Amino acid sequence: MKAAVLVNTGLFLLFGTALLYTPSTALVGLSLAAFGVYAFVSKPSVVFAGQFPHERHILIALLCMGLVLIALNIHHQERWGIYHLPNATLLSLPIFFALAHTNFNAKFLWSGGTLGAIIALVVAGYEIVILNAERAGNIIHNPIPFGSISMCLAAASMIGYQANTKAWSLGNACALAGMFAGVGAAVLSGSKGCLLALPVLAYVVHIKCIRLLGIQRHWLWLGGVLALVALAWLAADSYIVSRFDDAFHSAVAWFETGRVVDGSVGPRLELIRFAFDVAMVNPLTGIGRDEMVRMLQASATNGAYYPFIAQLHTVHNEFLNIWVTKGLLGLVAMGAVYGLSLWYFWRLRHHADAHVQNIGLMGLSLCLMYLIFGLSEVALQLTFFRNFFLVTLVCLLGMAHQQLNHSKNSLFNL
């Protein structure tokens, strides 16, 4: 009983306080990991009996990624600060045992997502309205991870929508409110990358709500078109629309003339060019993070690239950054985590048990969103950004294991 209270509280706080207090995710993750170590030590027979064959592939992939990155850091003689990603990966693994052998209630996670999304909108509104900030998210961390995690919380809140109850029950109203609050906070963050994940959230809304309401497809398309037209008309002069417009013209200018005319898209395109130029120096093991920064600063200072990028320490693309710094070995290790996770959660989406389906939908949404976020940012290299992904991923694996066993036992008892 005490174990269930601890785990359910951790699940609620994981999402509920994610954008309220920056170290919150790390503290919750460490607490669950400590309990997981206790569960591992107290019930070793469960661990070594091989009772989690499907989740094991992803856990092994996470373990391998951590070890490969540590080995490559040692090879490149990186300073200790560069070990944050493999260290966090290895520390998150015991969380699985905290969830896998405890009778949790997934509603705590979904309701935490609702609270977290509403808090995100309140924080964003405070910054924009009271502090007159141009973009929301700076008082928590920075706008990019703030807006991106808000989108993940919106998805979690929507997954809490209960199709077998009244459409406008209190619980469903809160789930919808959390979904809209998360999107609102993401919009106010001004991050273009996080808004690219809107199709993933639309998929969640379709699965949890629209499909079950039996709305005819042509009415759905008509409603979607009208909503987009209304949104475009209302936001014609808004900040977020102007950012997308600037991004388009900046990209066109860079491809046509090679000139950088903004501080966002243009520098990122220059960083991509730099990454492809440098990646082939040592394609297997990479050149190391510190060496990459040195080469970036030297090349930009010498005029080979736009001078502004000399101030940056990453190439602002998850997979190009890992390729340049850790080579194909690091890229394959990270790609295996994403690939196996997507395969696993996609299978859970088609399970007969509705609770398992919800866990699969959350895992699928999390991985797809982070893949999209990684197109314009190094999500797993930023502490706040990375902790949310790793802790949530391992929590979902443990939840899936427990729920699958519960579903299997229920069938046996029929």
Image (cartoon, rainbow, N blue to C red):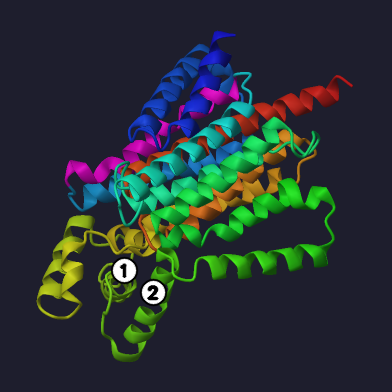
| Residue 84, percent from left and from top | 28, 41
Picture layout, residue 403 above or below residue 294: above
Query: Is residue 158 shown left or right of residue 169?
Result: left
| Residue 283, percent from left and from top | 32, 67
Residue 97 drawn in magenta: yes
Provide the residue span drawn in magenta.
79-101
| Residue 348, percent from left and from top | 69, 43
Q: Residue at x 42, y 58 (%)?
A: 374
Secondary element type, mark 2: helix
Q: Residue at x 39, y 69 (%)?
A: 243
Whichever of labels 1 and 2 marks the residue nearer the N terminus, that label is 2
- Please tell me whether the stretch drawn in magenta is mainly helix, strand or loop: helix
Residue assigned mark 1: 264
Q: Residue at x 42, y 54 (%)?
A: 188
Disc 1 marks which amino acid? Ser
Secondary element type, mark 1: loop
Mark 1 and mark 2: Cα distance apart in space? 7 Å
Residue assigned mark 2: 247
**Circle 2: is it few (<14), some (14-19), or many (20+) Cα within 10 Å?**
some
Q: Is residue 200 visible?
A: yes
| Residue 411, percent from left and from top | 84, 26
Disc 2 marks which amino acid? Ala
The image quadrant that residue 4 belongs to is top right
Seen as rendered, the residue at the extreme bottom is: 256
Whether label 1 touches label 2, CB < 8 Å: yes
